[in-house]
Amino acid sequence: MVKRVLVFFLKTLFISLAIFSTYYYFFLKPNIELAQIRSETIKILSLHKDTLIQNRIAYITLTQLDPDSANFNAEKVSAVNTLKTTREKGLSDIENYKVIPNVNKELYNRLPYLLSDLKRVYEEQNEILDKVYTTKSYDEGLTILKSEKAVKLLTMQTNLILEYEYWIEKLEL
């Protein structure tokens, strides 16, 4: 009697282990790995997007400074430093995170173009800021910061931010 119960218990345990290990290796483990890869991809895309947003905010802040304000110089230095920092960080992130896992075929194919557009935004912004630094007054610099080229740059930044948000939302579904 005890032997039968023990054999039944061992058979049940063995069959249960076989079922659960099969379930784990063929269903659960791939889903966990896919979720981790998605999470890593979202993290990389969010990093690019957040740096671009910080850069854009600093640029807009620079265009909206009041030259008559008591804090004008401090605010200007802060905005310029933020622009430089985010541009450098953005460019280094582009180099460090060129490849993402192939979670979504469309995104995987689109990423090189996204990164190239992002790099172009930072480079064009650097050109605009170099022109601003050579001006003698804030008003001359402001004219350059609000030029047609600068507006196109801001539009391009906005479009990139929206595209990054689109891909992040698509991966989160």
Image: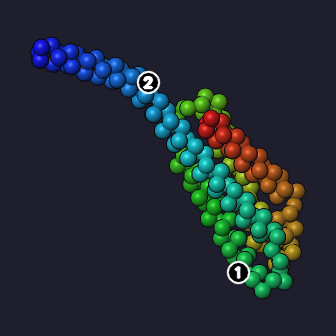
- Type of residue at label 1? Ala
Residue found farthest to the front? 1
**Whole-percent x and y of residue 48?**
62, 50
Q: Is residue 14 above or below residue 162?
A: above
For residue 74, the mark is: 1
Up/down of 142 relative to 172, above or below? below
The label nearer to you, 2 versus 1, is 2
Q: In which quarter of the image is residue 145?
A: bottom right
Question: Based on the displayed image, in which of its 4 quarters is residue 57 positioned?
Answer: bottom right
Q: Where is residue 103 in the image (x, y as percent from the top left)?
A: 55, 32
Between residues 29 and 37, which one lies in front from this camera angle?
Answer: 29
Q: Residue furthest bottom?
A: 70
> Badge 2: few (under 14), some or many (20 or more) residues near its Cα, within 10 Å?
few
Inspect this view and state whether residue 59 appears.
yes
In the rendered structure, the answer to whether residue 20 lies left or right of residue 36 reads left
Q: Colour scheme in the image?
A: rainbow
> Residue 111 or 132: which is nearer the viewer?
111
The disc, 2 or 1, on the residue closer to the chain's N-terminal end is: 2
x 84%, y 56%: residue:
151
Residue 23, percent from left and from top: 39, 22
Relative to 87, residue 25 above or below? above
Q: Distance between the residues labelled 2 and 1?
A: 57 Å
Picture layout, residue 158 above or below residue 167: below
**Label annotation for residue 27:** 2
Badge 1 crowding class, 10 Å Cα cut-off, few under 14, some 14 to 19, many 20 or more, is few
Which amino acid lies under the numbered mark 2 shown in the image of this protein?
Phe
Q: Where's residue 73, x and y in %?
A: 74, 81
